[in-house]
């Protein structure tokens, strides 16, 4: 794969999670929102949100009740950092993340590009009692 194929802005069209039995779920529903950007200088940023997230009861970004903040946190994924290609895998080297445990980690995603479509696939990942493979489907926005 050529890094230039990834460079640009991508819009999320679907997020699926498949378990070992082949059952497919959609973690953020039928209409997840998302933006993924790869720069030619080797930087990336990605954000994914569940559609129609509820507003908090405050106009202060760091305010709201504990349960409102928990719901907001659990319906949003965001991180940024450098990236590099290793064959058909993109490695995101995280510098910031809404999930603090990922800061400093490397997140590996297999890459499939076909025309203006991109699919990023996680390795099998333990989530509670299950092992899931997540597939994030993107369309080129620019």
Image (cartoon, rainbow, N blue to C red):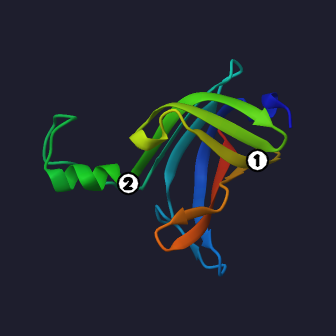
Asked which secondary structure carries label 2, the reply is loop
Q: Position of residue 18 (x, y in %)?
A: 62, 70
Residue that carries the numbered disc 1 in the rendered image: 111
Dividing the image into 4 quarters, which one contains the C terminus?
top right
Which residue is rendered at x = 68% and y = 38% of the image?
91
Can you see residue 34?
yes
Dividing the image into 4 quarters, which one contains the N terminus?
top right
Residue 35 as seen in the image, left or right of residue 140: left
Q: Nearer the viewer, residue 25 or 55?
A: 25
Can you see residue 142?
no
Which residue is rendered at x = 19% and y = 48% of the image?
56
* Distance from Cα at disc 2 to Cα at disc 1: 24 Å
Q: Nearer the viewer, residue 96 or 46?
A: 96
Which residue is rendered at x = 80% and y = 34% of the image?
5
Residue 78, compared with residue 72, is above or below; it is above
Q: Position of residue 124 (x, y in %)?
A: 65, 62
Residue 75: mark in rendering:
2
Which residue is rendered at x = 49% and y = 37% of the image?
79
Q: Position of residue 75 (x, y in %)?
A: 38, 54
* Figure quadrant of residue 107: top right
- Give the mark nearer the N terminus: 2 vs 1: 2
């Amino acid at each position: 794969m050529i890094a230039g194929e990834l460079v640009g802005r991508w819009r999320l069209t679907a997020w699926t999670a498949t378990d070992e039995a082949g059952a497919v779920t959609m973690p953020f529903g039928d209409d997840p929102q998302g933006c993924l950007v790869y720069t030619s200088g080797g930087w990336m940023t990605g954000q994914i949100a569940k559609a129609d997230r509820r507003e908090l009861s405050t106009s202060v970004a760091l305010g709201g009740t504990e349960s409102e903040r928990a719901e907001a946190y659990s319906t949003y994924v965001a991180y940024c950092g450098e990236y590099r290609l290793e064959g058909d895998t993109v490695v995101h080297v995280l510098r910031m993340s809404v999930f603090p445990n990922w800061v400093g980690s490397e997140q590996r995603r297999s890459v499939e590009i076909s025309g203006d479509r991109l699919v990023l696939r996680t390795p099998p990942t333990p989530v509670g009692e299950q092992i899931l493979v997540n597939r994030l489907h993107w369309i080129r926005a620019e």
